[in-house]
Image (cartoon, coloured by chain):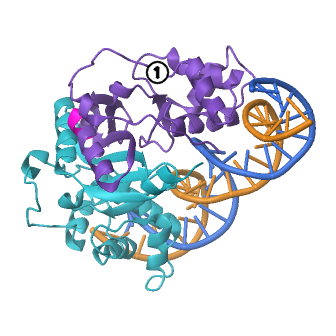
Chain colours: A purple, B cyan, C orange, D blue
Amino acid sequence: MTDSIHPPITADENQSPSVSGKVSPYSIPALRAELNDKGLRMTPQREAILNVFHTLPKGEHLSAEEIHHNLHSEHPSISLSTVYRTVKMMAQMGVLRELELAEGHKHYEINLRESHHHHLTCVRCTKTIEFKSSSALKVGAAAAEKEGFLLLDCQLVVHAICPTCQRSIL
Amino acid sequence: MTDSIHPPITADENQSPSVSGKVSPYSIPALRAELNDKGLRMTPQREAILNVFHTLPKGEHLSAEEIHHNLHSEHPSISLSTVYRTVKMMAQMGVLRELELAEGHKHYEINLRESHHHHLTCVRCTKTIEFKSSSALKVGAAAAEKEGFLLLDCQLVVHAICPTCQRSIL
DNA sequence: ATTCCTGCAAACGATTTGCAAGTAA
DNA sequence: TTACTTGCAAATCGTTTGCAGGAAT
């Protein structure tokens, strides 16, 4: 359905351990332009879905159902199917990152280039903590380069048990 | 239904860049002992399932269906439900690793410390290449330790575009 | 005018669960 | 004997898809 020139991630520029300053999530016009390039179209639904992420606190991630729920007050008619179709497309375009947390459903977050972070998840209670690591990104970038792949995204998923669940008897 | 003291992965001991030598997948008696510790039981089914992994080439991973299929010649009566229940339990015990590849179903592999490997996946054609990295594991272990989490597993998932798909026009 | 997009409802496929019978400790 | 386990079949649940009407270019 959709494909594109994805903005590649240049790992070597990302060595700064903390936030470097410039953050550029996809704007509505930028998305429209990229869609049009491919013969695809901007629609109110796509715009609304991207806006959900724009108004989301930095680093938050949502499931398809949560996006749908978030949308409901302003755009009650947007269907869950459309949400699924849209986030999948946006993930393939590099607008969103698709996170594979362990709960049996995917989460999406806006893909800020330099906010690349990783996830530490408790397999029991699914509490998730985000953290950054320039070296993890370097490892991924090196692997991609070695195989001639164009790097899009790189996430370290750490499955673990949180302190609370360690203490629980069950 | 089952929970346990998971054998944690101790990353600091794992700093050796190459294979450290000792490889110890769970033996049948060891599994029996740990099950009994928890008031759980060793059964022919659980033994058979663990044996599938013992006789599997190193680094191979299987889906629940594949395990079930593998089992069929020797133990035709073991149900798919039991396979699902068992691999989930074993993953929580740290006997198996649960891999979240992007295909919509999970794979399992025996949890050998040094077989920790990561995945480079093409987002267009889903071709996947595995690679190793001790530093990725160290990053995950450090993050877990910092937060007081007990590390179970840690995988780097790299989304990229393979050379073939880069060349394709679409 | 073309195509692409949408909402709806039905389909899907992997995984989970209730239950009654079987079995390890 | 107790209560954990199993196989079976039905149920779940996130996600996908076919289709006919609607909309962006």
- Residue type at mark 1? Pro
Image location (x, y in percent) of residue A119: 33, 35
- Name, please, the residue furthest toward the bottom: B73
Q: Is residue B106 visible from the viewing direction of this image? A: yes
**Magenta stretch: includes residue B81:** no
In the rendered image of this protein, does residue B138 appear above or below residue B114?
A: above
Graded by Cα atoms within 10 Å as few (under 14), some (14 to 19) or many (20 or more), the crowding at tag 1 reads some
Number of labels in the image equals 1
Q: Check disc 1 and report its element: helix, strand or loop.
A: loop
**Which is more toward the observer, A144 or B107?**
A144
**Which is more toward the observer, B102 or B13?**
B102
Q: Is residue B38 visible from the viewing direction of this image? A: no
Quarter the C terminus of chain A occupies:
top left
Q: Residue at x 27, y 71 (%)?
A: B58
Q: Residue at x 31, y 29 (%)?
A: A129
Span of residues in magenta: A132-136
In the rendered image of this protein, does residue B20 appear above or below residue C7?
A: below
In the rendered image of this protein, does residue A165 appear above or below residue A43?
A: below
Image location (x, y in percent) of residue B131: 28, 57
* Disc 1: host chain: A
Residue B2 appears left or right of A45: left
Image location (x, y in percent) of residue B2: 36, 52
Residue D8 appears left or right of A22: right
Q: Residue at x 46, y 65 (%)?
A: B64
Quarter occupied by residue B27: bottom left
Instruction: Give the residue pinned by disc 1.
Output: A25
Quarter occupied by residue B93: bottom left
